[in-house]
Amino acid sequence: MRLRSVNVSLPKTVPYRDGTLTTGIYKEPVAGRVQVHSLHLEGDGQADLVAHGGEFKAIYVYPYEHYATWQHELGRDDFAYGQFGENFTVDGMLETDVHVGDVYRVGTAVVQVTQPRVPCFKLAHKMGIPTFVKTFLKANRSGFYLRVLEEGEVGAGDEFELVRADPMLMSVAEINYVLYFDKDNYESARRALQIDGMSPGWRESFEGILAGAPEAK
């Protein structure tokens, strides 16, 4: 498990439809060591602080293994690190293997997996594909967010060391699938709610699922 690239960007304004759009999704690789703060990386920022950023979405991670798959499926060869708006491009951390709630040490920072990524229209705009949000969600190659438990610094080439696996052992892919494609799986929803590190937003979503369970009516 390795940090391949660290990518940051402050919000910038870009053309969008008949006007403009301000977004921080256009991440670019940075050289050297980068400071990891409690709510963001040094030099990074988000334009919409309601939908992005904050304690439970301080850092967005995307597996590099997906780059080749997307390039093949989309017939493209123009991808660069940060293509999906991620802060960390990583090797060996697929959504099927990483669990929500897992704690890792990378560089001198300690981080925890909090939720899968929910795609929005800004990703579709960056990719130049209006329907990409649906395509991205259906593929279940979401990447995942981290919160910062201990501040530190990181750089490309750093290894991820698993400090603690969440006892529920629910992968990012499983959590994403249950919420979006298996909403009647109340047993999995109950297990998900036992993950201490899960973000409040996703916790509320699973509570909403259980509110619709037969025994709750």
Image: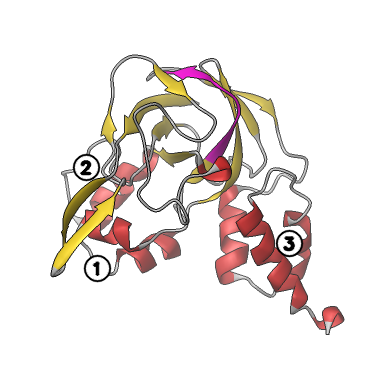
Judge from the rendering whether residue 108 lies leftward or rightward of residue 16; answer left or right: right
Q: Main secondary structure of the magenta part?
A: strand
Secondary element under disc 3, as helix, strand or loop, is: helix
Q: CA distance from mark 2 to mark 1?
A: 18 Å
Label 3 crowd bin: few (<14), some (14–19), many (20+), radius 10 Å? some
Quadrant of the image containing the C terminus: bottom right
Judge from the rendering whether residue 116 lies leftward or rightward of residue 125; answer left or right: right
Look at the image and say whether residue 7 sits in the magenta stretch: no
Q: Residue furthest bottom?
A: 217
The answer to whether mark 2 and mark 3 are in CB contact below 8 A is no
Judge from the rendering whether residue 114 lies leftward or rightward of residue 68; answer left or right: right
User: Disc 3 or 1, which lies upstream in sequence?
Assistant: 1
The residue drawn where x is 42% and y is 29% is 41
In the rendering, which numbered label is found on residue 188? 3
Q: Identify the image quadrant of residue 88.
A: top left
Judge from the rendering whether residue 199 lies leftward or rightward of residue 106; answer left or right: right
Secondary element under disc 2, as helix, strand or loop, is: loop
Label 2 crowd bin: few (<14), some (14–19), many (20+), radius 10 Å? few
Q: Amino acid at mark 1?
A: Pro
User: Disc 2 or 1, which lies upstream in sequence?
Assistant: 2
Label 1 crowd bin: few (<14), some (14–19), many (20+), radius 10 Å? some
Range of residues picked out in magenta: 146-154
User: Disc 2 or 3, which lies upstream in sequence?
Assistant: 2
Q: Amino acid at mark 3?
A: Ser
Secondary element under disc 1, as helix, strand or loop, is: loop
In the rendering, which numbered label is found on residue 130? 1
Q: Is residue 185 visible?
A: no
Mark 2 — residue?
A: 79
